[in-house]
Amino acid sequence: MKSVPFLLTLTALALASFIASASDPSPLQDFCVAVDEPHKASVFVNGKFCKDPKLAKAEDFFFSGLNVPRDTHNPVGSNVTQVNVDLIPGLNTLGITLARIDYAPYGQNPPHTHPRGSEILVVAKGTLYVGFVSSNQDGNRLFTKVLKEGDVFVFPIGMIHFQFNPRHVPAVAFAGLSSQNAGTITIANSVFGSDPAINPDVLAKAFQVDKNVIDKLQKQFWFGNDN
């Protein structure tokens, strides 16, 4: 009879393992609103529809042009070229994306987050000061590093992160993301440039500044560096 508690424990662990492994698939878009009568609405899926595999061709898995420098003459001094499922249809369901980031001298990829993917970045040219901030539960710790050519840094999923070029010469980096559509939320753009605007009283309280400061920030143009 001594084996009964062991069997109960083993069964409980097996059930816990099953429950832990049972989960919904990760979303591949910002939202997917349910409809009671799908025949009356356009049909969307979590990702994209698949073509007949027999009709697939090499071009479905190909993109050319990441060797071309992008224009960084903009307010933030950077340009992000994402090679995702919209550019390479063959990426659908594969859970990966590639990006090239060009930085002007003293340019930056402003603080942002990817809600659906982690990021691994490698510096191909120049020097970058990079970092991310952990969650409130972890005390909002800042993790930073100065990267040189060939250096690699990882930004965990959902963490606010940034890259800054501290030199007077251009820099280039390539990044891989663990989603075919990782999404990008640029903090300043989202908070101060939302449409419609967030009530300035809310932001003044949140940032603990005078409402006039918020009014000024909400009136300015917030540039997006994603292409």
Image (cartoon, grey):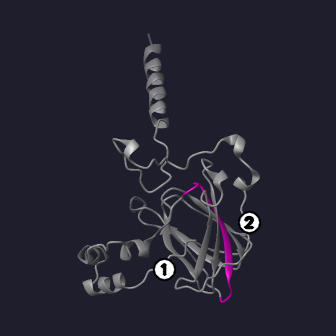
Q: Quadrant of residue 170?
A: bottom right
- In the rendered image, residue 81, in percent from the top left (x then y), is placed at 62, 70
Q: Which residues are magenta?
A: 168-181
Return the residue nearer the eye: 89 or 112: 89
Q: Is residue 185 above or below residue 204?
A: above
Q: Is residue 71 magenta?
A: no
Q: Quadrant of residue 140?
A: bottom left
Q: Which mark is residue 161?
A: none
* Crowd band around label 1 with a 10 angstrom C-alpha radius: few (<14), some (14–19), many (20+): few
- Tell me which numbered mark, 2 or 1, is placed earlier along the sequence: 2
| Quarter placement of the C terminus | bottom right
Q: Which mark is residue 223?
A: 1
| Quarter placement of the N terminus | top left
Three-letter code, disc 1: Phe
Q: Is residue 174 magenta?
A: yes
Return the residue nearer the eye: 10 or 217: 217
- In the rendered image, residue 39, in percent from the top left (x then y), is placed at 40, 42
| Residue 66 visible from this viewpoint | yes
Q: Are marks 2 and 1 in contact (CB under 8 Å)?
A: no
Identify the secondary structure beneath mark 2. Answer: loop
The residue that mark 2 highlights is 64
| Residue 143 visible from this viewpoint | no
Q: Quadrant of residue 172?
A: bottom right
- In the rendered image, residue 133, in percent from the top left (x then y), is placed at 48, 67
Residue 102 falls left or right of residue 10:
right
Instruction: Kindly report which numbered mark, 2 or 1, lies closer to the viewer in this rendering.
Output: 2
Residue 33 falls left or right of residue 206:
right
Residue in the image at 56% along x and 58% along y:
118
- In the rendered image, residue 136, in percent from the top left (x then y), is placed at 39, 62
Three-letter code, disc 2: Ser
Q: Is residue 213 above or below residue 202?
A: below
